[in-house]
Image: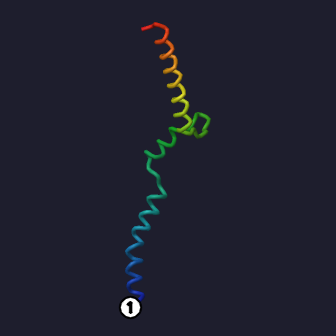
Amino acid sequence: MLGITPMLVSVSLVMPVTALTAETAASPSLELLEFLGDWESKEGEWQDPLELMNALDALEDDAQKVNAEGSGNGQS
């Protein structure tokens, strides 16, 4: 019987933490849902943020090339 008592005490200490974790994991916050919704197109398709960043990087590179070419032509 002495072997069971420590096990019961440890189980009773772990159960509230497990219940709290399961409850928290079951319901995401409203902020998280809104953040995830920002990455959805009007058609309901998910947009990869990395693809958007790559497109912005390409636009920035193009703008820098145009600025470099413009300054090389004697324009100020």
Up/down of 75 relative to 40, above or below:
above
Q: Position of residue 74 (x, y in %)?
A: 46, 7
Up/down of 42 relative to 2, above or below:
above
Quarter residue 14 falls in: bottom left
Disc 1 secondary structure class: loop
Q: Quadrant of the C terminus?
A: top left
Kind of residue at disc 1: Leu
Q: Say which residue appears at 41% left-offset and 82% top-offset.
A: 8
Quarter residue 19 falls in: bottom left
Q: Say which residue appears at 60% left-offset and 38% top-offset.
A: 44
Q: Quadrant of the N terminus?
A: bottom left
Q: Say which residue appears at 48% left-offset and 45% top-offset.
A: 33
Nearest the viewer among 24 and 67 is 67
Up/down of 11 relative to 55, above or below:
below
Residue identifier under label 1? 2
Nearest the viewer among 5 and 65 is 65
